[in-house]
């Protein structure tokens, strides 16, 4: 089954890449140069955090990993203008320290014109409380910065993730956790937003049109090495399935079916800011 | 006959081998020559085993240190002394680990004498520097920005003293209603001075972010110890270029900021606490967390002042591709450093400041020996 899915992903990628390959050697060689390197990448969820489709995990990328990308969220499951407009989320994610990660995302509703403004910006932090050991899973806490005046998908969750080796190549990353049903909203207009710690109010997610990560949640990502995987998750509201493939160790393409109903898809690209550039490596060798 | 053929074959083989060896060494000679062109104001002191040099191409001084060693191919050189604006920052020894030693003042003075004997020790260096200021979130115009490209250069007038000048080409401006005219880029004198672990920077002229006046910075920093502290003071006023001239308002801004920084060894994180008076008479404190990566620096900050409280992030990156054309006497390149800061709030003048060419603490932490060692 996995082979079949990998094949489908591969065919889709080929279709996407077709015009690039057709344009000729120069672009191709540039792409090869751009895509080669050693960076381990975890699959990212809708907000750009290592995880499944909606569900984040407690996994961490290596220190210095910088990932950018975007995801499409369909109309029925959108957070910003739920049931009215689909949306795109653009994100960057940086493993700033071995156990500390920051994520920034920007969500824009599709087809609303200028009334949308630039979009909702959100800052999330993630801290690893325990590293994964033989029996112990990795445990991490994820929090959305409380000073936003318009958080679309606040993540306040405690997650545990354990990688189970099924065979040499096949690994199941199992994540389980709990998303807080509460979130902090700052009741503030951007015109008087001069104090980012003022007017914080505790709100319940059940009052929102769409509850993101509110209650028990979890999922499994069954992956073939670090190249491709299939995902099953319970996001606290719905059951979702998805698949992803990582090309050249850096470029991930993913898609998911939300609640067996509408499709979400996205892509991300990963770099490592600690990697020594070739010029420095060369200068340090054979002098 | 057979011997003749063998001899011929042997000669052919040897000449091919010789050609290859010659080719290889020529190639590496070319490479060394090309590396050599990255440096300026170089002095080789074979008695003391020193290479004293300046490298303006890269933010990260590790490029200069390692490439100088490679370009030299001279094992008698054991100490590397990088300079900034003609002033030696310190003495580095390259081994399995890099070791740092502060420099006696006499050595810095010697370098000054050399500069006067040969004032052409610097290239004509031109570089492209982008500037981007933006407001996000206005409902009617989500991104209001002021973007320009600067063609900049520097003239070295004295040890440590440079004149910064250039031309500004506007690209977008819907941030303020000033005209989009090609105008002079920030134009100012800067004197950098070092004595032991004391570093000074004084600037006079027209700076970035529409402020002109005088700026002074002092920093006490041993480039091998974690703790450093500094002070910055300035008197400035607003300026801009309306059509057909320059407008300079009264010098009415006093900026006075003190800071203390502590650098953790692993990972490369600097924790910085600063406070004082910022522009528009706003007073407060700022806490910053700075991580130095190989080419990139990323900072997170939070601040609280009379005008409000905010948080955000900043980064410093080199703009690729770096050098574009480089000869022995002139060079055209992209900037070694582009800095940008995002603040979560806008329009409340919380802890605002302006930029001169460089900040002493930003410049000096790049030369910290632990930062250089952690990259290898």
Image: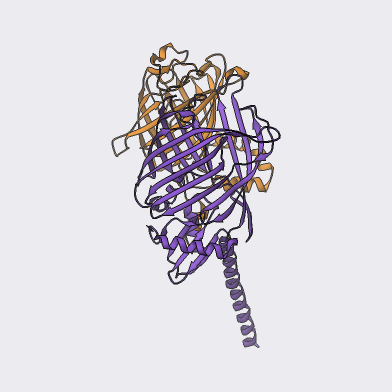
Asked where in the image residue B286 lies, by quadrant, the reply is top left
B245 to the left or right of A245: right
Camera-nearest residue between B161 and B342: B161
Camera-nearest residue between B303 and B202: B202
Residue plotted at (38% across, 49% down) = B221
Q: The orange chain is which one?
A: A
Q: How is the image coloured?
A: by chain
Residue A3: tell me if it is visible. Answer: no
Q: In this view, does B32 lie above or below B325?
A: below
The picture places residue B344, in percent across and down from the top left corner, at 48, 27
**The N terminus of chain B lies in which quarter of the figure?**
bottom right
The picture places residue B161, in percent across and down from the top left corner, at 53, 52
**The C terminus of chain B lies in which quarter of the figure?**
bottom left
Residue plotted at (63% across, 40% down) = B149
The picture places residue B101, in percent across and down from the top left corner, at 37, 58
Residue plotted at (64% across, 30% down) = B173
Q: The purple chain is which one?
A: B
């Amino acid at each position: 089954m996995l082979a079949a899915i990998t094949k489908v992903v591969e065919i889709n990628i080929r279709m996407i890449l077709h015009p690039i390959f057709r344009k000729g050697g120069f672009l191709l060689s540039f792409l090869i140069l751009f895509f080669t390197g050693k960076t381990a990448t975890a699959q990212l969820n809708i907000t750009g955090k290592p995880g499944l489709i909606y569900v984040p995990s407690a996994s961490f990328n290596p220190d210095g990993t910088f990932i950018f990308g975007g995801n499409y969220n369909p109309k029925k499951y959108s957070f910003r203008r739920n049931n009215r407009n689909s949306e795109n989320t653009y994100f960057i994610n940086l493993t700033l320290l071995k156990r500390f990660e920051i994520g920034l995302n920007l969500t824009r509703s599709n087809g609303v014109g200028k009334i949308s403004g630039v979009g909702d910006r959100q800052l999330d932090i993630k801290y690893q409380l325990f590293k994964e050991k033989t029996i112990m899973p990795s445990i991490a806490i994820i929090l959305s910065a409380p000073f936003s005046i318009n958080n679309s998908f606040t993540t306040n969750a405690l997650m545990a993730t354990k990688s189970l080796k099924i065979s040499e190549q096949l690994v199941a990353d199992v994540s389980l956790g709990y998303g807080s049903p509460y979130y902090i909203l700052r009741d503030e207009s951007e015109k008087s937003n001069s104090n980012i710690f003022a007017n914080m109010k505790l709100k319940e997610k059940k009052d929102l049109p769409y509850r993101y990560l509110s209650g028990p949640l979890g999922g499994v990502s069954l992956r073939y090495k670090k190249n491709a995987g299939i995902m099953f998750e319970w996001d606290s509201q719905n059951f979702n399935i998805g698949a992803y493939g990582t090309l050249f160790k850096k470029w991930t393409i993913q898609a998911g079916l939300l609640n067996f109903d509408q499709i979400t898809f996205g892509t991300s690209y990963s770099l490592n800011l600690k990697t020594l550039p070739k010029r420095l490596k060369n200068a340090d060798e054979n002098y | 006959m057979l011997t003749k053929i063998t001899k011929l074959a042997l000669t052919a083989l040897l000449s091919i081998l010789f050609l290859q060896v010659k080719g290889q060494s020529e190639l590496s000679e070319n490479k060394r020559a090309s590396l050599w062109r990255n440096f300026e104001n170089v002095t080789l002191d074979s008695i003391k085993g020193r290479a004293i040099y300046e490298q303006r191409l890269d933010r990260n001084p590790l490029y200069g240190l390692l490439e100088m060693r490679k370009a030299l191919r001279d094992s008698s050189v054991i100490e590397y002394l990088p300079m900034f604006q003609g002033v030696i920052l310190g003495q580095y020894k390259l081994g399995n680990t890099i070791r740092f030693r502060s420099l006696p003042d006499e050595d810095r003075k010697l370098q000054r004498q050399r500069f006067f004997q040969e004032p052409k020790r610097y290239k004509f260096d031109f570089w492209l520097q982008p500037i981007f200021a933006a407001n996000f979130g206005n409902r009617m115009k989500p991104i209001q920005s002021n973007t320009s490209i600067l063609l900049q250069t520097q003239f070295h007038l004295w040890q440590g003293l440079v004149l910064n000048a250039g031309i500004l080409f506007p690209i977008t401006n819907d941030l303020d209603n000033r005209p989009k005219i090609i105008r002079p880029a920030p134009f100012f004198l800067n004197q950098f001075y070092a004595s032991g672990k004391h570093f000074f920077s004084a600037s006079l002229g027209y700076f970035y972010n529409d402020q002109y006046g005088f700026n002074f910075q002092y920093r006490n920093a041993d480039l091998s110890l974690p703790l450093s502290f500094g002070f910055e003071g300035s008197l400035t006023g607003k300026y801009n270029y309306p059509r057909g001239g320059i407008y300079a308002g009264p010098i009415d801004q006093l900026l006075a900021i003190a800071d203390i920084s502590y650098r953790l060894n692993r990972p490369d994180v600097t924790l910085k606490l600063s406070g004082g008076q910022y522009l528009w008479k706003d007073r407060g404190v700022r806490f910053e967390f700075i991580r130095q990566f190989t080419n990139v620096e990323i900072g997170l900050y939070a601040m609280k002042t009379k005008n409000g409280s905010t948080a955000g992030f900043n980064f410093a990156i080199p703009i690729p591709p770096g050098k574009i054309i480089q000869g022995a006497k002139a060079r055209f390149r992209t900037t070694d450093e582009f800095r940008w800061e995002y603040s979560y709030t806008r329009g409340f003048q919380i802890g605002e400041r302006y930029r001169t060419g460089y900040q002493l603490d930003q410049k000096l932490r790049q030369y910290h020996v632990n930062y250089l060692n952690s990259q290898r």
